[in-house]
Image: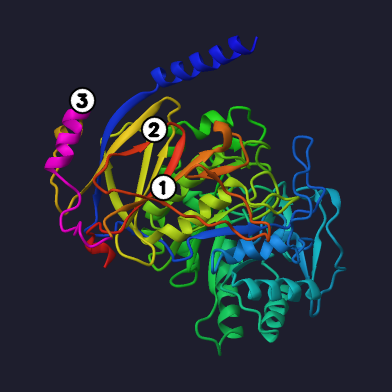
């Protein structure tokens, strides 16, 4: 019996090798100028308001992960945040417009969230006590967090009809809250106004003209309360799904220099209940559809708000808490890293993940606080990819996704390669547009011999000193444990990424490779490649 099993496994292995195809590709990187820029702290994560009994599809995956009940003393939490030096955290989400701040002249009782059929998303209003707010800010200060806080933009309004709200925003509770925040010395990087109130809304909507007038009120309030501060916190809005007509109108009504960052949300994988999520994640045409939203928002800002920058204020892939054993596993990193790369090309300055912890798509597991694969994906991006985005042209099929940035904090560039194919290995030559003028017909090679010959004729490493001891490239290969795409363990160059016994982040060390050797990326794998000696004038 053992012989037959071994023979079967051997034949399966041989079959797999035979089935694997090889595609030769050239990647041409233009290092002469940046085509877009991100903020230095591009990576962001949300801490939400959901109570523990928030449920979808007969599961309740949020646990105790909200800003109100999160265990700030958990030993892993501080370590995972501090690994980013200054991680941007957005406090916000679906219930933020139903939050009351227990401070000042609050005229209504301040109770915890509880289930209520007619409430926003099925919950009553909830309370943020100032003792808890102080504890949260002490933790954020300790861990170096850049804080974006979403204010209760529905406060004081009345419901006109289903999901449509009218009336002026009552700013008194927010005013008292911000005043208290300043008095305690709590540092806020940015205030966001409302959550998903734009267009037809999700749980609620507010008309564009009304919302624009309220933004003017909030900006005036921020300027007055922070009149002795320089710099002041910025104002970001509207934190919802892009609706061109609504977004255009808000920027027109609010006017020049009111909104500093235009935020929008992305859930382009559909509902978490969808059993087809893995196939969507590995479908390049599906992933690319969101580029139209990025492009349209960029045009809206250029036309109606050129003083503002574009932020993704929340992105969770699959909505309604994601999908268990998909959104929190290796396969989701294909989607996550591809979206980070694509958004950056459209001048998106900040990309905020929903969420740091909680749901099925937290960067950290909601029960153990152990990092999920996407956490390590985000951390590698943060450490390797600089602000300057470089243009990339490739001869490869759409299944090889490629993005290039100036390297972070040092010379050269870093490439992100994502192989979505389950059967094709890519053998890749990287060329520099400063040294090579490729014509389209020259980018297709039909054999390895002609491919490598082309590389030798048009070498990337013009100007590199092979004798100076620094001639290498760094490779960070990401694969799932045991080849299982839905594994919760990510391997870096074959080694599991796991917290140390002391709860510290493991070392994220590359493999050093001869720069003139052929670069490959296996099926269903991800690779960051840093080229320290790549000549790129945009990266000076």
Q: Secondary structure at mark 2?
A: loop
**Element at badge 3?**
loop
Q: Which residue has dot 2 on it? A: 399
Q: What separation in Å lies between label 3 and label 1 (alpha carbons)?
A: 29 Å
Q: Nearer the viewer, residue 291 or 131?
A: 131
Chain-order first, disc 3 or disc 1: 1
Going by the image, does 29 lie left or right of 212?
left
User: In the rendered structure, which disc, 3 or 2, sits on the residue that comes first in sequence?
Assistant: 2
Which residue sits at x=69%, y=57%?
48
Name above or below for residue 433 compared with residue 445. below
258 with respect to 75 (left or right): left
Which of the two discs, 3 and 2, sits closer to the camera?
Answer: 3
Q: CA distance from mark 3 to mark 2?
A: 18 Å
Question: Residue 338 versus residue 149: which sits nearer the camera?
Answer: 338
**Colour scheme:** rainbow
Which residue does the image show at 53% across and 40% down from the upper left?
268
Q: Any magenta on residue 459?
A: yes
The magenta span reads 447-469
Count neighbours of disc 1 (C-alpha within 10 A) and say few if under 14, some if 14 to 19, many if 20 or more: many
Which quadrant is the N terminus positioned in?
A: top right
Circles 3, 1 touching at the beta carbon (< 8 Å) = no
Image x and y of residue 344, in percent: 41, 54
Residue 183 in percent (x, y) is at 69, 86
Mark yes or no: residue 289 visible. no
* Image quarter (top left, top right, bottom left or bottom right) of the C terminus: bottom left
Q: Which disc, if any, is residue 446? A: 3
Q: Nearer the viewer, mark 1 or mark 2?
A: 2
With 140 as the anchor, is 27 left or right in this view? Answer: left
In this rendering, does residue 287 appear at all? yes
Q: Residue furthest front?
A: 3
Task: Give the distance between the C-alpha atoms of the residues marked 1 and 2, in whole angstroms.
Answer: 14 Å
Residue that numbered label 1 is attached to:
342
């Amino acid at each position: 019996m053992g012989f037959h099993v071994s023979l079967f496994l051997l034949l399966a292995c041989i079959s797999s090798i035979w089935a694997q195809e090889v595609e030769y590709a050239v990647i041409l990187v233009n290092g002469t100028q940046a085509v877009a820029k991100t903020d230095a702290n591009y990576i962001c994560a949300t801490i939400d308001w959901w109570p523990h009994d928030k449920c979808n599809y007969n599961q309740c995956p949020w646990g105790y992960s909200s800003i109100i009940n999160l265990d700030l003393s958990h030993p892993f939490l501080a370590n995972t945040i501090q690994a980013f030096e200054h991680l941007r955290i957005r406090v916000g989400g679906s219930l933020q417009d139903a939050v009351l701040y227990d401070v000042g002249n609050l005229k209504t009782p301040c109770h915890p969230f509880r289930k209520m059929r007619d409430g926003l998303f099925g919950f009553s209003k909830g309370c943020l006590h100032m003792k808890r707010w102080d504890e949260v800010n002490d933790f954020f200060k300790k861990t170096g967090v850049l804080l974006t806080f979403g204010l209760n933009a529905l406060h004081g309004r009345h419901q006109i009809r289903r999901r449509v709200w009218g009336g002026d925003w009552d700013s008194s509770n927010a005013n008292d809250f911000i005043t208290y925040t300043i008095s305690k010395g709590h540092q806020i990087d940015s205030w966001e106004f409302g959550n998903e109130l734009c267009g037809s809304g999700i749980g609620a909507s507010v008309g564009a003209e009304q919302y624009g007038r309220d933004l003017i009120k909030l900006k005036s309030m921020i300027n007055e309360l922070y009149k002795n501060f320089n710099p002041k916190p910025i104002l970001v809005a509207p934190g919802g799904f892009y609706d061109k007509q609504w977004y255009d109108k808000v920027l027109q009504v609010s006017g020049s220099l009111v909104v500093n960052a235009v935020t929008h949300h992305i859930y382009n994988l559909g509902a978490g209940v969808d059993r087809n999520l893995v196939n969507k994640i590995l479908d390049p045409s599906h992933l690319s559809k969101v580029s139209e939203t990025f492009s349209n928002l960029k045009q809206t800002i250029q036309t109606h708000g050129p003083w503002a920058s574009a932020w993704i204020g929340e992105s969770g892939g699959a909505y309604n808490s994601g999908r268990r054993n998909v959104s929190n596993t290796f396969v989701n990193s294909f989607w996550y890293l591809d979206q980070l790369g694509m958004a950056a090309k459209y001048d998106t300055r900040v990309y905020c993940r929903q969420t740091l912890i909680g749901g099925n798509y937290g960067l950290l597991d909601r029960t153990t606080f152990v990092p999920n694969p996407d956490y390590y994906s985000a951390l590698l991006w943060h450490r390797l990819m600089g602000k300057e985005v470089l243009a990339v042209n490739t001869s490869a099929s759409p299944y090889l996704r490629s993005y290039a940035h100036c390297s972070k904090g040092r010379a050269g560039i870093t490439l992100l390669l994502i192989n979505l194919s389950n059967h094709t290995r890519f053998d890749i030559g990287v060329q520099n547009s400063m040294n090579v003028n490729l014509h389209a017909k020259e980018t297709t090679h039909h054999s390895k011999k002609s491919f490598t010959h082309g590389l030798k004729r048009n070498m990337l490493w013009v100007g590199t000193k092979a004798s100076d001891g620094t001639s290498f490239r760094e490779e960070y290969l990401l694969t799932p444990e045991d080849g299982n795409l839905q594994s919760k363990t990510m391997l870096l160059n074959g080694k599991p990424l796991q917290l140390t016994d002391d709860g510290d982040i493991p070392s994220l060390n590359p493999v050093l490779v001869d720069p003139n050797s052929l670069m490959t990326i296996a099926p269903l794998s991800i690779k960051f490649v840093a080229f320290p000696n790549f000549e790129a004038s945009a990266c000076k």
